[in-house]
Amino acid sequence: MLTKRIIPCLDIKNGRTVKGVNFVDLRDAGDPVELAKQYADYGADELVFLDITATLEARATTLEMVLHVAEQVNIPFTVGGGISSVEHVDALLKNGADKVSINSSAVKRPELVNELADKFGSQCVVVAIDAKEIDGTWKVHLAGGTIPTEIDLFEWAKEVEQRGAGEILFTSMNHDGTKGGFANKALARLSEELNIPIIASGGAGNVQHFIDTFTEGKSDAALAASVFHFGEIPIPYLKTKLKDNGIEVRI
């Protein structure tokens, strides 16, 4: 059995880690490089960095941050935010990133998934999908959740898998920052319909939520932010509890 992964997510704005609720009301959560080292030392399996206001001016800052993170950690890390070209991915990987996460750019130009998978391999390509359940249907949203579309979550996930995505990072906008648990029904359906790993995101509030997403949600990995950033759930404690519940994790 493959081990389940615990992944702290660091949302980056102007070189700082921030965290909000339902994608808004952001507050400072610390220096991303320091947090990255801390998480690696505490037993995180991977890290995700998302430049949530990825403007062209911030790109140089992001590349510098990636370089510093790579010097400090010995676990895989993914970088996302504003990535729209093979050249940008090449620069991130050369600076030490292990994977990249694309979201809005993939919806706007789906061929980007093919191009990145062909150039760098599917294992490097994470497609992040922000979706909101509206009247029983999950709809994809773009630009940090600010632009709704009519695209169905499950159809889009299948398409990007066919195009070469190596993983899906699914964030439920309904659950994000609420600490009420992950969107396990949707996650289970994604896991059943796709053959690539599914990372659960949005809603972690306690240890039971992680247990539930690995069992009911059939998730391959669970991503969280505030419960880790603000010390509410220490990763070593979380992993011990997961193991106690028969969930295979790396300790």
Image (spheres, grey):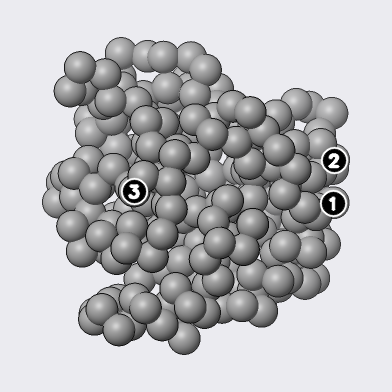
Q: Which residue is denoted by mark 2 in the rendering? A: 60
In the rendered view, tell whether residue 237 sits above or below residue 120: below
Residue 81 in view here: no
Residue 40 in view here: yes
Q: Position of residue 211 (x, y in %)?
A: 29, 65
> Residue drawn at (80%, 70%), measured in percent from left and top?
71
* Most foreground residue, 127 or 72: 72
Classify the position of the N terminus by image quarter: bottom left
The three-letter amino acid code for the residue at tag 3 is: Gly
The three-letter amino acid code for the residue at tag 2 is: Ala
Q: Do the residues labelled 2 and 1 touch (CB within 8 Å)?
A: yes
> Residue drawn at (32%, 63%), measured in percent from left and top?
208
- Of tags 3 and 2, the one toward the viewer is 3
Q: Do the residues labelled 3 and 1 touch (CB within 8 Å)?
A: no
Which circle marks residue 64 in the picture? 1
Q: Which residue is denoted by mark 3 in the rendering? A: 181
The three-letter amino acid code for the residue at tag 1 is: Glu
Q: Where is residue 112 in the image (x, y as percent from the top left)?
A: 49, 33
**Number of other residues with Cα within 10 Å of mark 3, as a class: few under 14, some 14 to 19, many 20 or more:** many
